[in-house]
Image (cartoon, rainbow, N blue to C red):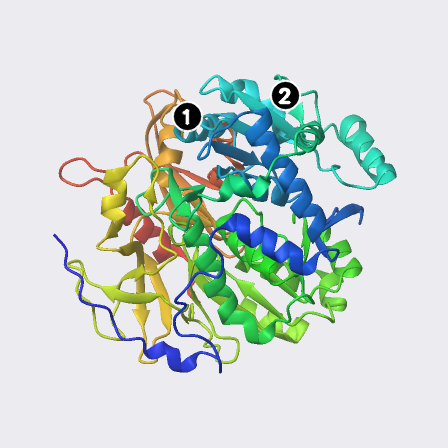
Amino acid sequence: MTHVDSAPARPWTKFYSVGMRHTIDEAPHPNLAAMVRSVARTYGAKTAFSLCLPNGMGGSLSYADIDRLSDDFAVYLREVLKLEPGARVALQTPNALAFPIVAFGVFKAGCVLININPLYTAEEMGNVFADGDPDLLVIIDMFADKLPAAFSRHKVRNVVVSSITDFMPWLQGTLVGLVQKYKDKSVKPVPVEHTTFRAALAAGESRKAGVKVSAYAETVGLDTLAVLQYTGGTTGVSKGAMLTHGNLVMNMAQSLEMVASNMVRGEETILTALPLYHIFAFTVNMLGYWVLGAHNVLVPNPRPLTNLQKAFEKFPISTMTGVNTLFNGLNNEPWFRDNPPKTLKSSCAGGMALQDAVAKRWREVTGTPVVEGYGLTESSPVLTFNPLDAVKEGTIGVPVPSTDIKCVDDEGKEVPAGQPGELIARGPQIMAGYWRKPEETARTVRDGWLYTGDIAIQDEDGYFSIVDRKKDMVLVSGFNVFPNEVEDTLAKHPAILEVAVVGVPDGAAGEAVKAFVVKKPGAEVTVDEIRAFCKEHLTGYKVPKLVEFRSELPKSNVGKILRKDLRAEEMARAPKA
């Protein structure tokens, strides 16, 4: 059994901004539903969310609109579908106006949200459906054609289909819909029985008379489950992190405490190019900036980066979040370099390491800082952030209020400052555990401490730097890729005898997935065929970018393939900085 010392000192608090709380003793809201209502009352007619497509078309909804429509959706869940408190609702859509309506409606109904990546293959969707067992799926029409195959793994009883054109002005929505249907053919007929999102809202509205919607969440407390956020966690097996209302309410408050000195309530405009189904954008962009009364500009797909140009031209963006590759890409876009946003004040990086060269170039281009934080899905996600007036470049900053972090050895004992150890953390943002996986929970959360699997160093001031990952996870443009999953897929190929997958340095994406393949005797297969096979079963960022054929793979004396040896070879080949 590991041993963890008592609570560590918090030397980092001396770098907190003036007036910033060291601890947050009380949750600012009793649950997320109450938070939504309270903020909506404050900001009312102010624009809350705007959709911005690459051509500049879109639509907007006010705080009052979102509050009203999410009430309608809550009533649809409880009165029309007759879902019980705690029922699970899966949401699979890119950034669109339906997203906050569904999420807030689920919270108001006392139900549990399951965020699902809309780019998942049917196989991956089916796996999440089987594990999370949702009572309802809300999916955007562009990806609904995958449902029959996904449902062959596990069927979801109720389906609601949204559209990117929902809440757009009639003419714009009609034009975009026609292009989707007839020109780029991105929207096909929905092949399963379903209800449209508009019809679901109308059904909820028609049943709202005489219903006290706020009563649905009266028994929802800080310990009540709010979100199942699927992640590979720290052991590489996909599982649902159970995030409570308290986890999210508190992490939102902790994050805002770090940036409050640079933000003006009711006056910020945030660009949300990161997907809201990802925990970083979910907590920071959607929940945090809702509380700030910000205008949230939603971009459904930031690739290619020219998709962001109209958003910067149309809206006075004052802040944005992103991963290193996004900032690096914008640094190298002529349209952005030649006309950087004049209203931008600061930006926040997370999801993957922020490279020093990228941060420096961003400051040169925009005249504003991009500062780095750190977190995991299991911590809702923010654990650390660089104080805006005490940024230490090359670090992930200091722990947010009410958070203890330290680096420990394999026995759980704290290592001295300057020495590497596994970063562990505790605080009100740490998940309740993994959904239906008590053994995995026990391995990851011990005595209230989350073992992150990341190796870090704490300096004498209390700033932390990530050294390496303890596990074999590969980080591609901020997304987790787990070798086991890719290897399991490749092992199904009839020409492959053995395979090992590792992450290799990739300047564009941080890391790239590389597969080392041993062919069966007499079998023939090309790199292109292997990648095409993977594309049938895996989301694009999980597909190996590189494939190398070997006659044999390095193994231990018990026959275990040694990924670490392959990774060491690749690191030796990599150009020295």
Secondary-structure class at tag 1? helix
Q: Is residue 300 visible?
A: no
How many numbered discs sit on the rendered protein?
2
Mark toward the start of the polypeptide (2 vs 1):
1
Residue 173 drawn at (x, y percent): 81, 37
Image quarter in which the C terminus is found: bottom left
Q: State which mark lies toward you, 2 or 1.
A: 2
Report how far apart the C-alphas of labels 2 and 1 lie in the structure.
Answer: 19 Å
Amino acid type indicated by mark 1: Ala
The residue positioned 18% from the left and 62% from the top of the image is: 4
Q: Residues within 10 Å of mark 1 (few under 14, many from 20)?
A: some
Amino acid type indicated by mark 2: His
Give the camera-side residue of 511 and 221: 221
Q: Is residue 206 visible?
A: yes
- Left or right of 297, for residue 375: left
Q: Residues within 10 Å of mark 2 (few under 14, many from 20)?
A: some
Eyeballing the image, is 450 above or below 515? below
Secondary-structure class at tag 2? loop
Residue 418 drawn at (x, y percent): 27, 75
The residue positioned 63% from the left and 52% from the top of the image is: 273
Give the camera-side residue of 402 and 352: 402
Quarter where residue 341 is shown: bottom right
Eyeballing the image, is 349 above or below 568? below
- Left or right of 448, for residue 206: right
Eyeballing the image, is 218 above or below 448? above
Give the camera-side residue of 480 and 492: 480
Marker disc for residue 271? none
Q: Name the residue beneath numbered marker 2.
A: 194
The residue positioned 65% from the left and 28% from the top of the image is: 161
Q: Dots 2 and 1: beta carbons under 8 Å? A: no
Residue 536 drawn at (x, y percent): 51, 26
Q: Name the residue beneath numbered marker 1.
A: 130
